[in-house]
């Protein structure tokens, strides 16, 4: 009797708006590095989400926020790929998280989630990653602890014309993280 592999639906949230973002190049590569049984989809850029304002929320949640919440809620897991801005999380990503945190049936609660950071510096976005972990504790996300993916000198590891990550050692390491995320998703399913 053959046992079928249940597909894990994973969405990717990118913390950068820049067209030539190195983090987007990393995110563009995830589908090819995913283990068997993991389906990866990139979420729309966060630029359409207005700055959080409780007065605006009182009127109605913006469509971009409702869409983001629905996509997160419908996924089995999430990967956040983000740069580091001023030793922390980019404002566009924090803003999106602030909006999503106010939705009914909080979409990140109990959701397996992996973090990947990349920067031109040697620390690879480590400080942003740790701040993001603190934020996600409050939202009750189930953040994968290991392996941690922090890509330093990312500009030397991508093919800008193809828009993808090319460094084989980094690709192999990310593939291991995606395998670990898939195992975490499987544990939370049962």
Image (spheres, rainbow, N blue to C red):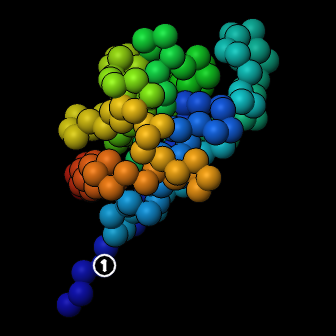
Instruction: Give the residue furthest to the right.
Output: 59
Residue 49 as seen in the image, left or right of residue 190: right
| Vertical position of residue 112 compared to residue 122: above or below | below
Q: Residue drawn at (75%, 9%), measured in percent from left and top?
A: 55
Percent x, y of residue 117:
40, 32
Q: Quadrant of residue 110?
A: top left
Observer-nearest of 188 and 179: 179
Q: Quadrant of residue 126?
A: top left
Percent x, y of residue 127:
35, 17
Q: Residue drawn at (40%, 23%), measured in percent from left and top?
A: 121
Percent x, y of residue 29:
48, 55
| Vertical position of residue 152 compared to residue 73: above or below | above
| Vertical position of residue 189 compared to residue 46: above or below | below
Q: Residue drawn at (45%, 28%), measured in percent from left and top?
A: 120
Q: Residue drawn at (33%, 55%), measured in percent from left and top?
A: 168
Tally the numbered discs. 1
Percent x, y of residue 170:
32, 48
Where, quadrant-wise, is the C terminus in this rendering? bottom left
Q: Which residue is mark 1?
A: 4
Q: Is residue 81 visible?
A: no
Q: Quadrant of residue 123?
A: top left
Observer-nearest of 73 and 26: 26
Where, quadrant-wise, is the N terminus in this rendering? bottom left
Q: Is residue 26 visible?
A: yes
């Amino acid at each position: 009797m053959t046992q079928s592999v249940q597909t894990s639906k994973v969405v990717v949230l990118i913390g950068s708006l820049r067209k030539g973002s190195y983090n987007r190049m990393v995110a563009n590569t995830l589908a090819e590095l995913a283990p068997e049984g993991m389906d990866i989809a990139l979420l729309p850029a966060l630029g359409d989400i207005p700055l959080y304002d409780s007065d605006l929320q009182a009127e109605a949640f913006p469509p971009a926020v409702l869409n983001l919440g629905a996509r997160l809620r419908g996924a089995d897991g999430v990967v956040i790929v983000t740069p580091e801005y001023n030793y922390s999380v980019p404002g566009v990503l924090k803003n999106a998280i602030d909006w999503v945190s106010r939705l009914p049936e909080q979409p990140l609660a109990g959701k397996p989630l992996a973090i990947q950071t990349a920067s031109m510096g040697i620390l690879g976005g480590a400080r942003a990653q740790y701040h993001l972990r603190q934020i996600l504790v409050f939202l009750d996300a189930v953040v994968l602890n290991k392996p941690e993916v922090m890509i330093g000198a990312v500009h030397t590891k991508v093919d800008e014309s193809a828009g993808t990550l090319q460094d084989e050692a980094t690709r192999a390491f990310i593939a291991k993280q995606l395998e670990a995320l898939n195992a975490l998703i499987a544990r939370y399913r049962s």
